[in-house]
Amino acid sequence: MRSLGNGRHGFPENRSERTSGRRPKVARLLDEYGLDALGTELERLWTTDTDERRSLRDLADYFNQQLLATAMDEAGIQTLDGESENVYRLLTATDVSDADRQRTRRQLEREGVDVDALLEDFVTYQAIRTYLREYRGAEYSQSTGDRTAIEKQNVQQLRGRIAAVTEGKFEQLRDGEHVDLGDFRVLVDVAVVCEDCGVQYEASELLDRGACDCRSASG
């Protein structure tokens, strides 16, 4: 890994030098930050069938946390275990106040971290997907269909339990003359809204589709 120099992280200040070539952003950043082994780890965490498996969104957060930890290390900032993850949360989480976010930025900048440049390097889960699928040729297919079917059944069972419990409560209230209600049915709908593409799906429908509209938009 290059030492901290004239450019941020010791890398070229001319951005055209950094973006030349056709490698995806994640692959380029792995080289720039000296995190070559992280690519293999990302692929393992995405394709494993164990409890270690992480989603693309989780991997994007993990990748960005490693960039932050590297930038802090290059700036000579000594951190305790888990501290860089908390700094990442303060910089990116939507539930963090503006005051806390600005305080974190100023502290990092005083220590020599170019926060604006670092945030520009942070990637989305789409970038992780492009890197894993198109650059490394990785696929998560083993047991995918079975896992989807299992989770669909789990969702349906949860929905059935909610309906049964709700029905029982209303029967008790009706029998105790707390609610005036004739014959009734309880309907439980579970919807999933993707905040990126803005499309809402019934949970079982989304599991059958295997993807929201983000895939077609990114294609």
Image (cartoon, helix red, strand yellow):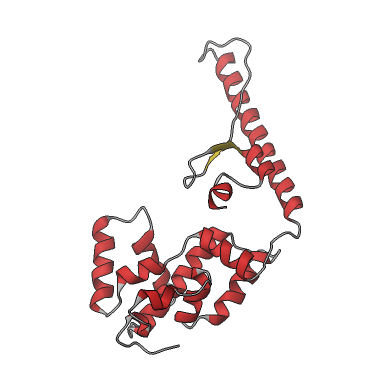
Front residue of 78/41: it is 41
Specify the quadrant of the image occupied by residue 121: bottom left
Taking the image as shown, residue 148 lies to the left or right of residue 120, namely right
Q: Which residue is drawn at 42% across and 79% down?
A: 70
Q: How many labels does the image show?
A: 0
Specify the quadrant of the image occupied by residue 77: bottom left
Residue 43 coordinates in the image, percent (x, y): 63, 70
Q: In which quarter of the image is the N terminus?
A: bottom left
Residue 206 coordinates in the image, percent (x, y): 63, 41
Taking the image as shown, residue 95 lies to the left or right of residue 39, namely left
Front residue of 202/215: it is 215
Q: Can residue 80 be seen in this view?
A: no
Residue 50 coordinates in the image, percent (x, y): 69, 65
Residue 30 higher or lower than 156, as above or below: below
Q: Can residue 99 be seen in this view?
A: yes
Taking the image as shown, residue 34 lies to the left or right of residue 149, namely left
Pick out the residue farthest to the bottom: 3
Residue 117 higher or lower than 98, as above or below: below
Front residue of 208/181: it is 208
